[in-house]
Image (cartoon, grey):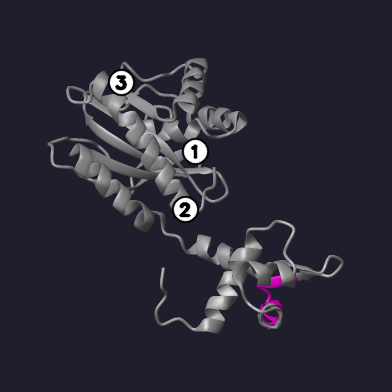
Amino acid sequence: MQRENVVKSVSRALDIIALVGMKKGGLGVTEIADQIDINKSSVFRTLSTLVQYGYIEQVHDKGKYKLGYKFLDISSKLLESIDIRTEAKPFLQELENKTNEVIHLVVYDQGEVVYIEKLEGTETLRTHSRVGKRAQMHCTSVGKAILANLPENDVLEILERKGMPAHTDYTITEKEALLQELKQIRVRGYSLDLEENEYGITCIAAPVFDHLGNAAAAVSISGPTTRMTKDRLNQLGPIMIQTSQKLSARLGYVR
């Protein structure tokens, strides 16, 4: 691909950074020069400049160069600046367009989930959810999606502290039964709320992982049970998993 309006020295430096980053043990000047067809003196000067700024480090006993810790500083600032609502919006809108149902985004906070985004869809649906509302985890699809990916000790502590009250006749109120379902969710990749939080409403959700691998959030689709049939839930399952993977990747998660 032809590059336009490129500063050659900057382009050369970026090519060298990309090349060095691909080799775990680092690369020497000759190896770099051979691979990107630049003379060794130019490679050395570029490397020396990058070393001064911390983007490249020299492995003195091996005569090789590797990525510097400056990149960790930059990447941490990038990760800190990520706004999950902003990053999630295109994926939530895609789900809304595909399903016409209510779409939620929640974050995990102190043993509960907090709704931080809600798209209403085009179909009529009355739900108690609203942006800013907190909800228990054992009876919601978003809550169970996150619980399934927490350490079991954390799960038990949450259940002990928050309890497992029945919201409907279908709410799971036995600890062992919930733990078994969480195992199934981990294997399946998505969770279900089969009228466990509100009568007449069925939800499907998938976890969202941050750059540390923590299940920090979840995305869900909610609809009336009459529309959210078993066949439809089976069709939505892979879509939820794919959405989870794409959004998690945007947050810096590496599987």
Whether the magenta-drawn stretch holds residue 238 is answered as no
Magenta residue span: 48-57
Residue density around tag 2, few if under 14, some if 14–19, many if 20 or more, within 10 Å: many
Q: Is residue 17 left or right of residue 79?
A: right
Q: Secondary structure at mark 3?
A: loop
Task: Name the N-terminal-most of marks 1 and 2.
Answer: 1
Frontmost residue, 110 versus 8:
8
Q: Is residue 71 left or right of residue 40?
A: left
Query: Can you identify the residue that label 1 sits on?
Result: 111
Residue density around tag 3, few if under 14, some if 14–19, many if 20 or more, within 10 Å: few
Q: Is residue 251 left or right of residue 127?
A: right
Q: Which mark is residue 247?
A: none
Q: Residue at x 71, y 83 (%)?
A: 41
Residue 193 image-quadrant placement: top left
Q: Nearer the viewer, mark 1 or mark 2?
A: 2
Q: Which mark is residue 251?
A: 2
Query: Can you identify the residue that label 3 sits on?
Result: 168
Three-letter code for the amino acid on which mark 1 is drawn: Gly
Q: Nearer the viewer, mark 3 or mark 2?
A: 2
Question: Does residue 135 appear in the picture of this structure?
Answer: no
Residue 32 image-quadrant placement: bottom right
For the residues marked 1 and 3, what is the alpha-carbon distance in whole angstroms?
Answer: 21 Å
